[in-house]
Structures are given as C-alpha cells and as structure tokens.
Image: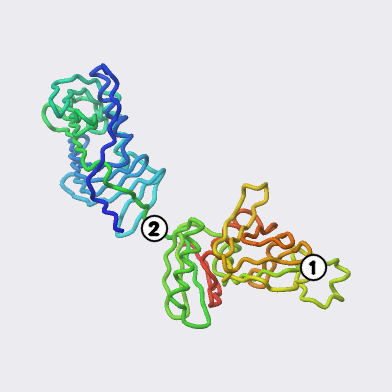
Amino acid sequence: MTILVNCTPKVIKPVVPKDIPPQEIPGFAFSQLRNQKSFRFHLRFKTDTPALIEAEFKGNVVLPNQEERTGVWSRLGEKVTTHIKGIGDFQYERKDGKWERHPRGEESNILMQIERILLFSESELKSRKSRELVFGLKPNLVFLDPTQSKSMSGLLVINHSSRLPLKIQVFDSARTAFWEIRFYDYNRVRKLTSPFIPKIRIQLVAESKIAAKVKTQLIDRFQQIGRRIKIKALGNKIELQLEQAITETQLNLLISQGRVEIYTGDWLEPKNSVSDTGQIKYFQFRPVRLNQLILNNQAVERAEANSSQGPEPILELYLKAQSRVKLEGQNKLLFLIFDDEIIGYAQVQQNELIDRLQFKEVGDILKVTTIAAIINSGMIKQALKLLSKTEL
C-alpha cells in the first residue's frame, strides 16, 4: 500500500472558548498552530538597516521541533542560496555541497518569531468576515529595525473556522522594512530527517569479495542500535561511515559473524576441569563442561534486551515454533556460545517446552542490546577484519 504525502490535509480544529475576548484570539491562534502536526510556510522580508537585506524562503515545519527551509538571501545585491534544517537542538546548514551542524538558532525556528508577534503584540480586531478575522498589530521585530527608529505596524489574518493563522504582515509606513509569512498545507508533511554528517571512517577487509547481503546485514545491525551508517564496498574491502564515535568493543561485536550455538552443560570445579573428558570452556574464569548442542542461529525467531527484571539486563531469545524443545531429566543449564565464546547461561526446568530462553550475565545494557541486534540480523557468513578506524 502506498501512502501519499500530499493527501488532503486534516486540520485539527479547536474547541473555541465561549465569549473569548478579541484581544486573546491571536494568542489562541498561536496555540492552535502548535496543536497541528505540521504546516508549510512562505516567508519574505527586507530591511535597510544596517544594510539592505532581502530574503525569501519556503519551508516546512513538523511539530514540535523540526523545520526545513530553502531560499535566497540578498545582502547589498549579493545573492546567496541557503538550505537550513532545524532538528531538535541542532541546525544543519548546506555550504559548498556539505552539511555543517551547529547549535540551533532563530534562523531555523520560525515559531520563535511567530510567537513573538502573536503573543507579545498589541492587537485590535479590524474586521470579522464569514471566513476570516483580520487584526491590526503593533509588533516588535527587532531584527527589522535594530535602531527602533521606525513606526512598525502589521496585519494578522486568521481562519474563522479553524482559528489558524493564514497570513502575518509587518511593515513600516515607508515600506523600508517588511516581513510577511503565509501559512498553507496544514498536516501534509510527515517527517523531516537530519542530514548525514560522517565523523568516523571504518575500513574492513574479508578474504574474498564481500557479498551484497553482508552490507545489508551491517546496515541492519547499526540501525537496530540507533546508529545511521553509510557503507561502500569494493571487492574484498568495505568502508563504513558513522555520525558518532563508537568503542572498539562494540564495533568488534557489530562486525563479528554472530554465530550462535546453545549447549546443555554443567559448571565444573576448577580442580576437576583438568581431568574431565568433555568439551571444556571458560565463562568468566569458571570452567564449563559443554554436553549437547541443541540450538543455533536458525532456531531463533528474534532476540531482545530485557532490563525490566532487575539491575542486570537479560538477553531473551524467542524460538521459532518448529525449534521449540523439551529437555528430559533433571533441571538443565544452557550456555550461549557466541562466535566460540560463552557469553551467558540460562536455567530451564525439566520436561518444560522451551519457547523462550533468558540468558544472564551477558553484560551491560549496551552489550546486550548490541548482541540482540546481531542475532536479529542473522549470521554473517564472511569473516570481517578491522583495518582502520579514523576520525574525519
């Protein structure tokens, strides 16, 4: 099913208080604006103080804190094309073909200027029509008149039914300073995304040409832990670009093959581990005798990190219906082998049909979440080796 972004907008209409005073309607219109999911705007302004500046933008706002605008600045006749995104506390500016990230300012937050006009301006209802309410304003936009030497006035047009602003104009009598915004397409824009700005470059190598599926699995692993990534593969080498730093430990996990094996087994006393004839491995310096391999990657439907059962996170493995097993005899210990290393253990009761396993002592929540992502992405059949990790 295809979802069309440019579908007919649905305005979220307010419950208008009875007998609301006219001077409170502009403030109510701003509240109504903030209650929408999104809107588009067309902004124009100019001023001759301290220099002749003109600008025109078209933009999208996704509430509560996202904005994107494109347009042209003109200062003393010199024009500059601009593309700015404001996402949360940061803004992204496109310069010389690359994105730069900075703390967010008013130039990417049109709501600050709208709020200043609608909440802190004197207003007077000029006309009440069937579809519109028109107000006169005495606004204060300092950037239009830094010297405070101009007599500024304005107009506000509000939709009578929805109480949403349609247009705001601010100007001086000589029209040497002018600011206008028009609102349209309420609730059509679904989402804005921040630009990808790489900070870390990672290079990997394999013994043979890297398969396309390996790229897909790596992207999936990083996305599951909330990291955006770009990948470029050439022959037996692959390059990863990340937006944030990553520890060597977590990186080595994410590029591992992720082979899962689950064995029945027993704890051993250190003095008995030397003479024992079974398969011996160590888990956190404790010897373990592994007995029978009962499950592997193909048996796992999904993995999850569970931190709701106490201070220690648990790695939960949910088994596919055809892979559920019942272990006869005494209560059993199961050990999770991850790329030939024991990383956790689970206890199961005798004669219990196992559809979910909870492994303890896997590590902190970062490690458990990372391993769950690796298991969910499936085992990578090629072995990858880290060549380099550099900051950009």
Name the residue carrying label 1: 287
- Left/right placement of residue 3 relative to residue 274 reads left
Q: Where does the N terminus fall, quadrant-wise?
A: bottom left
- In the image shown, does 229 or 37 lie closer to the viewer? 37
- Label 2 amino acid? Phe
- Left/right placement of residue 300 relative to residue 200 reads right
Marks 2 and 1 sit apart, C-alpha to C-alpha, by 46 Å
Relative image position of residue 262 (x, y in whole percent): 67, 69
- In the image shown, does 161 or 301 lie closer to the viewer? 301
Relative image position of residue 346 (x, y in whole percent): 70, 60
Q: Quadrant of residue 46?
A: top left
Q: Residue at x 78, y 68 (%)?
A: 288
Regarding mark 2 in the picture, which secondary structure is present there?
Answer: loop
Numbered label attached to residue 381: none
Q: Residue at x 35, y 46 (%)?
A: 86
- In the image shown, does 146 or 94 lie closer to the viewer? 94
Q: Quadrant of residue 243?
A: bottom left
Q: Could you tell me how many numbered marks the image carries?
A: 2
Image position of 246 with respect to 307: above or below:
below
Numbered label attached to residue 196: 2
Regarding mark 1 in the picture, which secondary structure is present there?
Answer: strand
